Image: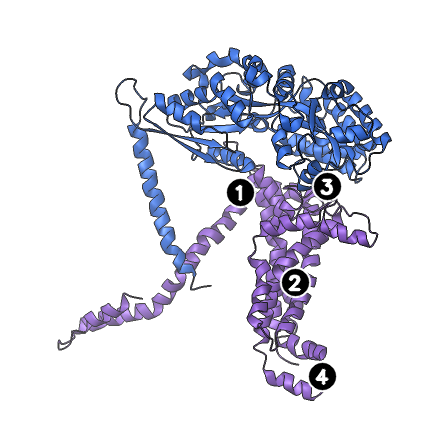
Chain colours: A purple, B blue
Amino acid sequence: MATRAPDRLAAVPPGKPVRPHHRVRRHLVHQLDVKGSPYAYVAPFFLLFSAFGLFPLAYTAWVSLHEWVLLSEEQTFVGLDNFRTLLADDYFWNATFNTLSIGVLSTVPQLLLAIWLAHLLNRPLRAQTFFRVTLLLPNVTSVVAVVVIFSQLFGRDFGMINWVLSWFGVDAVPWNEGVASSHVAISIMIMWRWTGYNALIFLAAMQAVPRELYEAATIDGAGEFTQLRRITIPMIKPTIVFVVITSTIGAMQVLAEPLLFGVYTLTGGVDRQYQTLALFIYENFIKLDLGYASAISWMMFVFIVVIAGINYLITRRSRGGLL
Amino acid sequence: MGTRRPRFLGPMLAAVALTVSVAACGSGGTSASGPAGSGAPAEKVKLTVALFSDFHYAPLYEEFKKTHPNVEIVERRAQFNDHHTNLVTQLTTGAGAADIVAVEGGYVGAFTPSPEKFHNLKDYGLDKRQSEYLDWKWQLGVSNDGSSLMGLGTDVGGLAMCYRPDLFKKAGLPTDREEVSKLWPTWDQYVETGKKFVAAGVAGAKFTDGPGEHFRAMVEQAPVGYYDDQYNIIAGTNPEVRKAFDMGVRMIDEGLSAKLPAFTPPWNTGIAKGTFATMVCPAWKTGTIKDQNPGEGAWDIAAVPGGGGNQGGTHLMLPKQGKHPKEAAELIDLLTSKESQIKLFKEASALPSLPVLYDDPAVAEFVNPYFGNAPIGKIFTDAAKALKPQKVGPKAGDILKAFGDGLQRVEQGKQNPEEAWAQALKDVGRIK
């Protein structure tokens, strides 16, 4: 940006006749500037993306075709062997099931809750900023801290949740032992972190909805819930599509929660009852079995593309705006 | 988002430039450094020491600098797991390892198959130390092919059984540590004692934390563990492993277990509140217990069933990447010397790996008031002396985890023992 201004001043010294080939050159520079500089401005992103996004993606694909153990000196090309092993691996399908289960358990209630919270905040309130900042607080808390605290709350012998349940005569629940119970516990941790964040995105979208629509609806006698269902949700549909897709991608990549739930565990519990795909990758990565870990990464990538696509198709059907 | 990205570029370029210049310095330094000549004003030598906790080495570094004024020592520490994973990465990528690295007992076996990645300490005359050491500790630091001495031992983790006298009293069992030790010369008798404890019906307490650590101790007491002499995995066929697994299952069946896997937060709470009465106790676990603040005398220490044992303890090794092996070897010679080990025992309760020190009054007569004046120096060194060397293979930790998880699956009622055993073997089979 800084280089342009002096360039122009120097190019047109006052009082001197501009020679024709100078004009041609200036024209060329100008053309180059107009046509070329936009690419120069976006180039840094694409350079970084190539280095940290595209290259790893391609290299992971390359590694996944090898028997690639970090400790051994040579890597042998094995074609699609890793993928063949993977598709026959119970632990892989177990991790896939866990990921989907935790994904659904965390994302669906989370988004409903986020819309509801945003709706509550989308009205004149005292100390509005306070409430909005509060919504974001769980999200800026370190995920490790969140998981450690929740693991204690979900403790079997001394956890607060079991203590409260005991008032109602419920026996101590070993939260991290069962499949369903551990998925619920992990989903709650995810919801705790992300509900407020998504609510803020919804809130921003809601504030762009014209007030008149609500006023007209109120005059027509529409209640609170009808207004939410008939005006707000259709009007913020594009945002909902966006949030659904980002949350789904996030849910596919859950790692820290299962890794640290209860005790640091690469297998997600002794029966792999809450090992997610990301954790399964990490387990194989720690074993330095990079070929296999890369193959899992690519399968996960495919899953994410497929699920994001399905989400898109489902949520696309009606575009934003009122009927 | 888009506007923020270009800002990364500046720092990134700076970082690249810095890396290049640092690399240049590094290679320059390398070519300049030769073997430090004796006599003539020696050039500056910088030694990095990578540890996974505070080993209380600072005064010893000062001592070393008195005889080696040209040596500068920098210590870096990382969290236990990270430290060892980093070391693997540094060795494979060929860069970044410290001159001296600490390797804990559970990991030594992962490195002894690769003597080419470490300096051979025999080249620096350290094999003269062999006679001072506990045999099994010395053998741990020798490469699998026997060609190279890769590490010198620092401390050992002699094994005992910690118990709660208050709960033993409630169960009508003896509380004196001599008599308690007599209750369980063997693991069978340990389980029988547990059954008596259960029969007495002590409210709110189980006999022990969980079978995992007991399983580990039993396997490590056997002459052969997960690996045979040629470092083949024989965990599935070695009757000793199955015996230990079955003993673990028995402990579960008899209701001895509080189902608290070691080193978890609820287990910590259990130590403080006394929800279990015994646990397998290497020397360093006395520190863990004290950290939970159960109160003075709440826990006491008796002998471990099965006769002796060890868990943990560390070796110091010199990665081949280090440019100053001579100075580094001299430093680890000092850090592991008799004088140093006795100092470290007094300061940091690190149990020496040199049996000659076990009769030293500082060790033999050491009592710990927090554990009812238990003579921990004697208890733990007796255990360490009684241990027989066992071949520890590269993946012993992973194999142990497979069986430990299996026992927990039984404990949690997810699988019967046969299913758990089968799956543990399957998991062991996946280990590469």
Badge 2 and badge 3 in a common chain: yes
Q: CA distance from mark 4 to mark 2?
A: 34 Å
Where does label 1 land, which residue? A63
Secondary element under disc 4, as helix, strand or loop, is loop
Tell me which label, 3 or 1, sits earlier in the chain.
1
Badge 1 and badge 2 in a common chain: yes
Q: Give residue B61's quadrant in the image.
A: top left
The chain to which mark 2 is attached is A
Q: Amino acid at mark 4?
A: Ala
Along the line of sight, which residue is nearer the eye, A174 or B22? A174
Q: CA distance from mark 2 to mark 3?
A: 31 Å
In the image, which disc is placed on residue A271? 3
Where does label 4 land, which residue? A222
Task: Residue at 67%, 33% (x, y): give it.
Answer: B401
Q: Foreground mark, 2 or 3?
A: 3
Q: Residue furthest bottom?
A: A219
